[in-house]
Image (cartoon, rainbow, N blue to C red):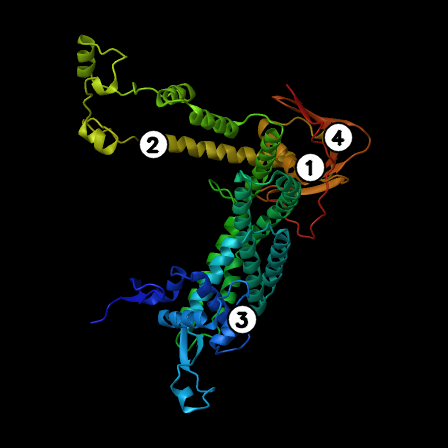
Amino acid sequence: MTSSSTSHISPTSSTVVPAPAHYTPFAHLTAPNAALYRQVMRTFLVAKERFAVHLRPEDVYAALDATSRPADVEAVAKALDSLVGWGNLRADPDHARVTAVEDFYRRRFIYQLTRAGEAAEVALGTYDEVLGRRGELQAVALHDIVTQLRALLVIAAEDEPDPAKAYVALSVLTARFTDLADNARAFMGSLQRTIDLHDIEVEVFLAYKDRLIQYLERFIQDLITLGGRIALLIGELEDQGRVGPLLRLAAGREAADAAPGEAEHAEAAAYERCAGRWSGLAQWFVSEEGRESQARLLRGRALGAIPQLLAVVRQLNERRAGRSDRSADFRTLARWFAQAPDDAARHRLWRVAFGLYSSRHLTVDADTLAERTAAPEPASTPWGEARPLRISPQLRRTGSYERRGKPRRVADRGEAKRRLAEIAARQTAEVREARERLATGGPVRLSRLGDLDPAAFRLFLGLLGDALATWRPGMTTTVATSGDGSMEIRLTALDDGSTAEVRTPEGVFSGPDHLIDIIDLTEEVRFGPPVAPALASAAGTEAVER
């Protein structure tokens, strides 16, 4: 009868520690001298990458860092023997250096990595890499995704698509999208940790802040410009039913080298993987009813990080100027507590600072109220001397109390659902009419846009906001796409000093006149090289007169 666990003895202790049989190669992480074990294992992994299979204790000792290695080779030899016991290394007799009979009986070994030891070290390397990754916002990946989606459109338009081309395009698309998503998630996590720092050096943070805000603004501009274009390309592929055949071609290509008898299963598994990756790509860039795309959420988090950074800068400046803040108040209060002469003074300070008194908000029943009315309890009575308050055992056990009685009737929500469906249909129709109203059919002056109803005006403000987000000094023209990829706006600044007014039922929207071209992409799809984003600044003079 075998056991599912084994035991190991620490090299510096006689304590027996049970460990799972399959995970003993990780035991050196929690043993004494764990830092030495990690250095030894990294030495073997580096040697394997250089095609060195066996190492002697002297070789390992020489490869260790001179500032942290032990004083003699004997300590390294003991560490090697411990790693052999845990299954990380394998020891073989070293007969190459035997020159006499006494050398043959002397204990000499050469060591090499085991499969379990190598797997454990690779896993630890991946763990360290993921924890240390700061991530980045890869604007170049957005351009690569657009390029690969256009390549898929070209491949799908062929009479007989090439499976190799489809497989390569989908593989590159998946790789670039995976890098984009993973790095964006890691970057936003590290950005939040940067914002939450309290003991950071002020000068370092202020110098880093400017570069970080410029970095965020540049990525947001690319995400606005290219995110809608990517959503449009994905919709074009899915609307014409081209995705399925491309995924099947790629799956067949991936499963081409499957073992005999496994081809059908391998192709089905490959198709499932490809379909899952495509679904993740579509959900990342395309919003649906009731669910925002990850690209839009990322854009919102990146935009929200900028005012948070500025708030941190404001707090740092207030601290440098000597102004009081909450942390300084708490430090002062802590100093007052430490300087208080006795506990009575500390209690008085506590009550004054936090205003916490006896509990007087518990709900009581009618019998308790009648009893308290007949024999009132003075408010000055100490808690320990007052009459006890009877609490239901269920309330004490669960924290909630529910009276027994007839259950509530099941509500009929059919009418509410019908009303919601009507509201959704009406809103959809309003959005469609707003798109038709805003489509200019060519460049026109903003001053000739005319009166707008509330729905069309909200859509116009959203498009204008997307265009303004791409503004950079010195630019006169910009192109932006809405987040759902349905509208495109092209805005060009005019230098004649004219003013435009757009009238709505809620007021008048005014600002410098521009040449505007709004295109409804759901009616006419245009594919071409992306236009260089540019915009003349009108944000400072726009106003709504009410």
Occupied quadrant, residue 151: bottom right
Q: Mark 4 points at which residue?
A: 513
Q: Where is residue 204 in the image (x, y as percent from the top left)?
A: 63, 42
Q: How crowded is mark 4: few (under 14 residues within 10 Å), some or many (20 or more)?
A: many
Q: Where is residue 219 in the image (x, y as percent from the top left)?
A: 63, 46
Q: Is mark 4 on a helix, strand or loop?
A: loop
- Residue nearer the viewer, 480 or 87: 87
- Which residue corresponds to the image point at 23% horizontal and 71% vertical from the top-left? 2
**C-alpha distance separating marks 3 and 1:** 72 Å
Q: Mark 2 points at which residue?
A: 413
Asked if marks 1 and 2 touch (Cβ < 8 Å), the reply is: no
The extreme top residue here reads 374
Q: Is mark 2 on a helix, strand or loop?
A: loop
* Amino acid identity at mark 2: Arg
Q: Is mark 3 on a helix, strand or loop?
A: helix
Q: Name the residue under label 3.
A: 63
Asked if marks 4 and 3 touch (Cβ < 8 Å), the reply is: no
**C-alpha distance separating marks 4 and 3:** 71 Å
Q: Position of residue 265 (x, y in %)?
A: 40, 69
Tell me which label, 1 or 2, sits earlier in the chain.
Answer: 2
* Amino acid identity at mark 3: Ala
Tell me which label, 4 or 3, sits earlier in the chain.
Answer: 3
Tell me which label, 4 or 1, sits earlier in the chain.
Answer: 1
